[in-house]
Amino acid sequence: MGLEAKLKQDGFFTTTIDALAAWSRKNSVWPMPMGISCCAIEMMAVGDPKFDIARFGSEVMRFTPRQCDLMIVAGTVTYKMAHVVKKIFDQMPEPKWVIAMGACTSSGGMYRSYNVVQGIDQFLPVDVYLAGCPPRPENLLNALIQIQEKIGKTRVRDYPDQPLEPQTIQQN
Amino acid sequence: MIEQYIPVFLVVAFAIIFAVVVVFSSKILGPQRPTPEKLSTYESGMKPVGSTHERVSVKYYLVAMLFIIFDLEVIFVYPWAVQFKNLFHEIGTSVFFSMLIFLIVLELGYLYVYKKGGFKWD
């Protein structure tokens, strides 16, 4: 951090629980890679050494929702897939965040069609919308940084221990 | 004698303590906000179908038995083969014959399986 180099004698820090929790939360955002279509290729590129999402502490893409904080919905969400996306999002532990990656995910994009959800904000609480078709990897990194800024403002008491209302989901 | 194993005990103790701390710290520190949906089985977002306690074909039992035969063989033969020269100079020909007896016993099992048609997969 550079601070310890300036110390002339033994020192200590004081901080708040909220700051500590937010700091650790935002530097260990584990994404759930919901790679549904072509945006997922750019999402994979973010994981490679050239763009290196590990610099932001998010290199551990978990393929189970139990260990994830951030859902990167990368690709066209059809109505048939929307149930799956919603169910996986519901199974993620709180606190959790969502990136709507790309034009299709954010607004339906060029698929102005009967079978494509016109924006996943119809059923998910989206935190960051990403423009582009597909967005460049730097753009996804930018979205992650914005999510981190948002996480930095959370407090511990925003997420108390309590059972939540059951979300009803219609699945065929 | 037992003092030599203190590092091993330390490693085992550290492994156990670390695992327990990791498991229970997430239980204590993490927010517990259960919903029926969150607690349901994860099956890639689909509705779970069927039970996990399903019966499997008896063919896999045969595969497991064969695996034990050959796996045990390899487990014992490998270190024996690596140390064979040293042991031969120390103990003598009994090193060779004890392994031979072991292999003959295994071979009998192999022949039994062969006779029973265990290698005919269909």
Image: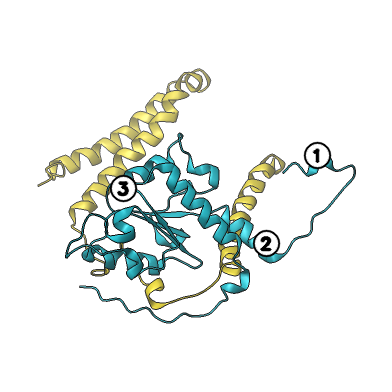
The residue at which mark 1 appears reads as A5
What kind of residue is marked 1?
Ala
What subunit carries mark 1? A
Earlier-in-chain disc, 3 versus 1: 1
Residue B95 occupies quadrant: top left
The residue at which mark 2 appears reads as A19
Q: CA distance from mark 2 to mark 3?
A: 36 Å
Q: Residue at x 24, y 73 (%)?
A: A171
Q: CA distance from mark 1 to mark 2?
A: 23 Å
What subunit carries mark 3? A
Secondary structure beneath label 1 = helix
Q: Residue at x 58, y 73 (%)?
A: A158
Q: Which chain is cyan?
A: A
The residue at which mark 3 appears reads as A133
Can residue B42 be seen here? The reply is: no
Earlier-in-chain disc, 2 versus 3: 2
What subunit carries mark 2? A
Q: Residue at x 48, y 54 (%)?
A: A30
Q: Position of residue A43 (x, y in %)?
A: 38, 46
Q: CA distance from mark 3 to mark 1?
A: 46 Å
Q: How is the image coloured?
A: by chain
Chain B's shade in the image?
yellow
Residue A123 occupies quadrant: bottom left
Mark in front: 3 vs 1 = 3
What kind of residue is marked 3?
Cys
Secondary structure beneath label 3 = loop
Q: In this rendering, would B8 be left or right of A11?
A: left
